[in-house]
Image (cartoon, helix red, strand yellow):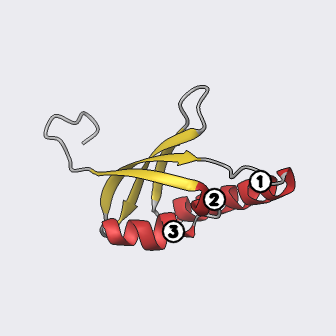
Amino acid sequence: MREFLVEITTTVPEGTGQDEVDRRRAAEAVRARELAAAGHLARLWRPVGEMRSIGVWLAGDEEELHEKVLGTLPLRPWMTFTVTPLQPHPNDPGR
């Protein structure tokens, strides 16, 4: 599987009830755990004070990433993505 750096910004639509937001966020946490267990979500961070996430995600290709991984997130309708395909660097100390 290929690695992708994915920046996710979530914007809750104006007028959305707090119950709906809470329900989707709870479902999002469950789905993130499932995707991590399946090997699609490697790491996830949230910049301090921001409503966005930065993560390392894995999929066979970018189409699969969008359709079968990110597209399955319960908050997907409220999200925008910036996806950067990654490749190993010869000087990566983690290799």
Is residue 77 found left or right of 71 in the rendered image? right
Q: Position of residue 43 (x, y in %)?
A: 47, 46
Q: Amino acid at mark 1?
A: Val
Report the front residue among 72 and 44. Answer: 72
Q: Position of residue 91 (x, y in %)?
A: 16, 34
Q: Residue at x 49, y 53 (%)?
A: 80
Q: Position of residue 2 (x, y in %)?
A: 29, 61
Is the residue 79 above or below the residue 45 in the image?
Answer: below
User: Gap in Å between the C-alphas at discs 1 and 3?
Assistant: 18 Å
User: Gap in Å between the C-alphas at discs 3 and 2?
Assistant: 9 Å
Q: Residue furthest front?
A: 14
1 and 2 marks in contact (CB < 8 Å): no
Is residue 75 found left or right of 92 in the rendered image? right
Name the residue that disc number 1 marks: 21
Q: Which mark is residue 88?
A: none
Is the residue 39 above or below the residue 18 in the image?
Answer: below
N-term-proximal mark, 1 vs 2:
1
The local secondary structure at tag 2 comes to: loop
N-term-proximal mark, 1 vs 3:
1
Q: Which mark is residue 71?
A: 3
**Crowding near pointer 1: few (<14 within 10 Å), some, many (20+)?**
some
